[in-house]
Amino acid sequence: MRVVLLGPPGCGKGTQAELVAANYRIAHISTGELLRAEAAAGTDLGRQAQAVMASGQLVSDAIVLGMIEHRLTAPDTDNGFLLDGFPRTLVQAESLDRLLDKLQQPLSAVVQLDVDDGELVRRLLSRGRADDSEITIRRRLGVYEAQTKPLSDYYRRQAKLHAVNGVGDIDAIWGRVFAALGGLDKVDANH
Ligand code: B4P
């Protein structure tokens, strides 16, 4: 199982990613977490990324792609992986497809969590991470709209997109994500 979890900041990607990874026993790869770990370790890459993340912009494609390429060769991805927060731009999506072609491991599905902006702002303000001020959240939502939203059409054209309502309690949303992935398994088994 090789899955991308797509959705705006605060939609519950991190929360649902943990449930998917635990239930399917696949690696959970969050580019946000990888970047925050680099920042906490004080590496050059981490220092560059920290300033960009604090401003609400996206870290450069080159940095993120290098990190992902390295991460996808780790042995814990043998059983599959879930990408949380990656790809976030068309360049990243196209590069991911090329990399997975090379590895002969195409994506199984892309699950998109749909949540309205008011609810996103409310969730992120109550989370209170360093990059969760109202002004930064608004900028991140703008960046999502301009740079990440086009990925819905990109994956719809590949017939891989499963849109799921991301509003409600965490277990109910997990049920919808599971149904989207379970439906896909049945399709695979029939072909
Ligand atoms: P991320 O770490 O990916 O952060 P995020 O999108 O803000 O968080 P996420 O969407 O995972 O939050 P979640 O819903 O789980 O990225 C941070 C920054 O890193 C980016 O702004 C960017 O600068 C950089 N970056 C990362 N990836 C990059 C890439 N590929 N390219 C370039 N730059 C990149 O959680 C939100 C809150 O909602 C939580 O408190 C949670 O408990 C709560 N919640 C979850 N489900 C809920 C529910 N059903 N109801 C109510 N609350 C819920």
Image (cartoon, rainbow, N blue to C red):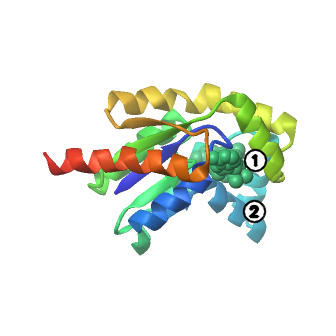
Return the residue nearer the eye: 6 or 114: 114
The reply to whether callout 2 and callout 1 are in contact (CB within 8 Å) is yes
Q: Is residue 97 left or right of residue 43?
A: left
**Is residue 44 or residue 128 the one in the foreground?**
128
Is residue 42 visible to us here?
no
**Tag of residue 53:** 1
Tell which circle, 2 or 1, labels the residue nearer the N-terminal end: 2
Name which residue type carries label 2.
Answer: Ala
Q: Is residue 55 left or right of residue 105?
A: right
The location of residue 76, given as percent across then percent down, is 42, 72
What amino acid is labelled 1 in the image? Met
Which quadrant does the C terminus fall into?
Answer: top left
Q: Is residue 188 visible?
A: yes
- Residue under numbered circle 2: 39
Determine which quarter of the picture holds residue 113.
top right
Q: Relative to 58, does residue 41 appear above or below in the rendering?
A: below
Q: Is residue 133 above or below residue 128?
A: above
Is the CB–ligand 1 distance for label 1 below 8 Å? yes
Vertically, is 128 above or below 23? above
